[in-house]
Image (cartoon, coloured by chain):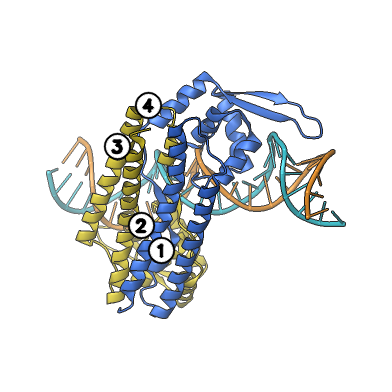
Chain colours: A blue, B yellow, C orange, D cyan
DNA sequence: GCCTGCATGTAAGGCGTTACATGATTCT
DNA sequence: AGAATCATGTAACGCCTTACATGCAGGC
């Protein structure tokens, strides 16, 4: 589980409440978790117990009290070790290709309808991601290097969907005379 | 959950035992489930209850009895409907890019070590997948069209990892002067 | 003697999701 | 009047994984 380390990452950037972390999770496409309440608040309690973070309760008027978390030295070391640990290969769950796997006995018209829908969705996603990158809503840029890396994280997503579009185009062309 | 439909897909190809289905799951890289006992045998019971499949117990000497499943007409219709249903976008879980996200404050030597390891693993994967495609161990090819589609399924995986390699190469080059 | 293949299943637990719960304020 | 924002949390459930369990046959 590296959800824990992703949260530590955000807290290494700046102090935050669970609510704020949750917002980042939903805004950043490349995070593989949705960042729902259960995940965030449970994990925060857990890493507090492990002494990777500490919290301060801040009272506000007109709004409910906040629990502001900050990373400890122990947490920084944990994060650093994880960042440098051996990377895993990405895992993809693509149900479309499982649909395709059993579409071989259908007529081309039906298959093309399926393919075109998929391609359209992919195209929409690429447009959306490109928009998000342009706006550069959220990115830690404590240094030129970090800003560059975060830009590349967005490009990673875009490239991935773009290469899927290329593949599906090739697939479609190949099917024409089959 | 489309694990169910993936199993139905295999049974639309030919009659099989749970054990055999399990083998296909582990051999086919593009299936997003591992196909462990719990998944397969539980799902088989479930789709039997739904009357998508029927089973026959076949006794063998020297080996334990087999439960051979075959798809029903109801199951074929269910499969067909699923195949033609609106496709979802692929979901990717890439922990490497989360590691990268918090690597911005490290020196390039450290980052390059991480990147190079990732790139190496990706390269290994591409080689392995290419080998598997060459050998064409498993593929239903009831028609020219189906054989083409299944070849393209392998290419989908290969392309995906290849485009990740391209991205990571670009990333590395961009980091040199940062 | 030990591992692998054949063949079926169960148990336990982790991870992730949706939905529920509260309660004030501010925007439409 | 109703929805959204701020802010925290809990409950229930489903999916998926690892590990456990059995037992015979054949190869090294």
Discs 1/3, front: 3
- How far is the residue under mark 1 from the one under mark 4? 42 Å
Determine whether label 2 and label 3 are within 8 Å by CB: no
> x, y (%) of residue A51?
55, 21
Pointer 4 and pointer 3 on the same chain: yes
Q: Residue at x 49, y 53 (%)?
A: A130
Discs 1/4, front: 4
Give the residue pinned by disc 3. B116
- The part of the image, by quadrant, that contains residue A99 is bottom left
Discs 2/4, front: 4
Of label 4 and label 3, which has the lower sequence position? 4
Secondary structure under the numbered disc 1 in the rendered image: helix
Q: Residue at x 43, y 58 (%)?
A: A94
- How far is the residue under mark 2 from the one under mark 3? 25 Å
Discs 4/3, front: 4
Of label 2 and label 4, which has the lower sequence position? 2
Determine whether label 1 and label 2 are within 8 Å by CB: yes
- How far is the residue under mark 2 from the one under mark 4? 36 Å
Q: Residue at x 42, y 43 (%)?
A: A152
Determine whether label 4 and label 3 are within 8 Å by CB: no
Give the residue pinned by disc 2. B30
Give the residue pinned by disc 1. A98
């Amino acid at each position: 589980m590296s959800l824990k380390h992703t949260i530590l990452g955000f807290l290494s950037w700046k102090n935050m409440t669970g609510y704020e972390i949750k917002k980042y999770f939903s805004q950043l496409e490349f995070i593989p978790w949705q960042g729902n309440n259960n995940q965030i608040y449970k994990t925060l309690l857990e890493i507090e117990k492990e002494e990777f973070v500490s919290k301060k309760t801040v009272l506000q008027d007109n709004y409910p009290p906040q629990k502001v978390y900050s990373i400890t030295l122990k947490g920084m070391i944990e994060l650093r070790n994880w960042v440098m640990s051996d990377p895993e290969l990405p895992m993809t769950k693509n149900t479309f290709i499982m649909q395709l796997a059993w579409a071989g006995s259908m007529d081309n018209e039906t298959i093309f309808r399926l393919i075109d829908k998929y391609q359209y969705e992919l195209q929409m996603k690429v447009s959306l991601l490109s928009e998000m990158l342009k706006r550069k809503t959220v990115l830690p840029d404590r240094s030129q290097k970090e800003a560059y890396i975060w830009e590349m994280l967005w490009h990673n997503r875009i490239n991935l969907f773009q290469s899927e579009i290329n593949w599906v185009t090739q697939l479609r062309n190949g099917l024409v005379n089959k």
